[in-house]
Amino acid sequence: MRIDLLGSAAALPDPDRNHTGIAVTVADRTYLVDCGHGATRQLMRNNLDHVAIDHVFLTHLHYDHVADFPYFMISSWMCDRANAPIVFGPPGTDAFVGHLFEGGAFDADIRARSAYPKRQGNLHVLRPEIRTITPGVIFEDEHVRVIAEPADHIPPEICECYAFRFEAGGKSFVYSSDTRPLEGIERLARDTDLLVHDCTFPRTALEFRDQVGVGTSAHTSPADLGALAARAGVKALVPYHFGHFDTTNPVLRKHLAGHMPINLAGPDLLDEVVSDIRKSYDGPVHLARDGLRFDL
Ligand SMILES: [Zn+2]
Ligand SMILES: [Zn+2]
């Protein structure tokens, strides 16, 4: 099983990191988990063909996890995709996808391009099958089994959020999605070969957010993540979905100032992330970055 990180940032525009996207490849088949900004281009950078991806798994409908989806779909239509993908997502995914293509936000684009006869031949690929996620095994084929587990991130009445476990050939990979630390995800990650887990803010930023009451979404601190990874016995850990706290870009730092004490922000905070994880977890820790590849 091969895992490619296509993005590694939280939700603000970040000159150094794409938004969330992970490719899972088994044999010659690639499965896409989330499709945040930059995911499609990063697939190509990692020599993975977006046109060959027939299964997309969306953890939740925050824009930093789905904004690249129309780009993924329309560009693969233009690249002669033959089959409509199957899209797994939380309740609401059918409405999200249903508003994008024919008769939706990109209707004029699609009508213009389909004036060319060749583009009419595969117009059906813009009508993906939507499968709504419920907890448990959500997909199985000859290569992989995919299990979904509820995450706790935003109010579920607004959007449910799911962690995924991929199993193939005796190996496993778990992605937490955006979430606070949960026993259910700890169980899902038991003895996994690779856990990619929410680690949006280091301790100093979380304390600031609590004091000023900023932020409405639940995330996981590095110390809590290290403790969870140790209890679950994960074989390797990737703290993921960084909240831009390592940026040196002046424009991003201006916008980040509302989320954390900006005088503390900088690459040094990555050291704090690792040392907080190390209080409990002594296995391999790989800081997330775009394009990082793991072969399990
Ligand atoms: Zn996110
Ligand atoms: Zn989110």
Image: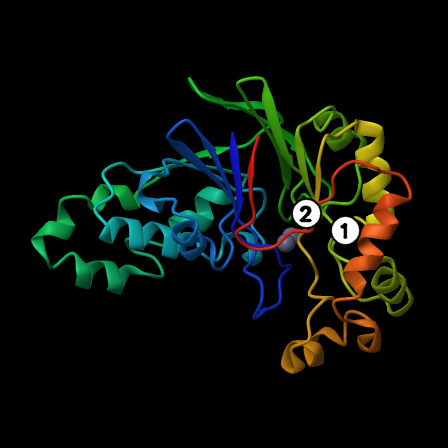
Name the kind of residue labelled 2 in the image.
Asp
Of residues 149 and 286, the one drawn nearer to the viewer in this rendering: 286
Q: Is residue 226 left or right of residue 289?
A: right
Gap between marks 2 and 1 measured at Cα: 8 Å
Q: Position of residue 198 (x, y in %)?
A: 71, 47
Taking the spot 70% from the left edge, 27% from the top edge, the residue there is 188
Residue 178's disc number:
2
Q: Position of residue 31 (x, y in %)?
A: 45, 36
Q: Is residue 202 visible?
A: no
Q: Is residue 139 visible?
A: yes
- Which quarter of the image is occupied by the C terminus? top right
Provide the residue designation for mark 1. Answer: 218
Taking the spot 62% from the left edge, 46% from the top edge, the residue there is 159
Pointer 2 and pointer 1: residues touching (CB < 8 Å)?
A: yes
Taking the spot 25% from the left edge, 64% from the top edge, the residue there is 108
Q: Is residue 38 left or right of residue 217?
A: left
Q: Is residue 90 left or right of residue 124?
A: right
Taking the spot 19% from the left edge, 44% from the top edge, the residue there is 122
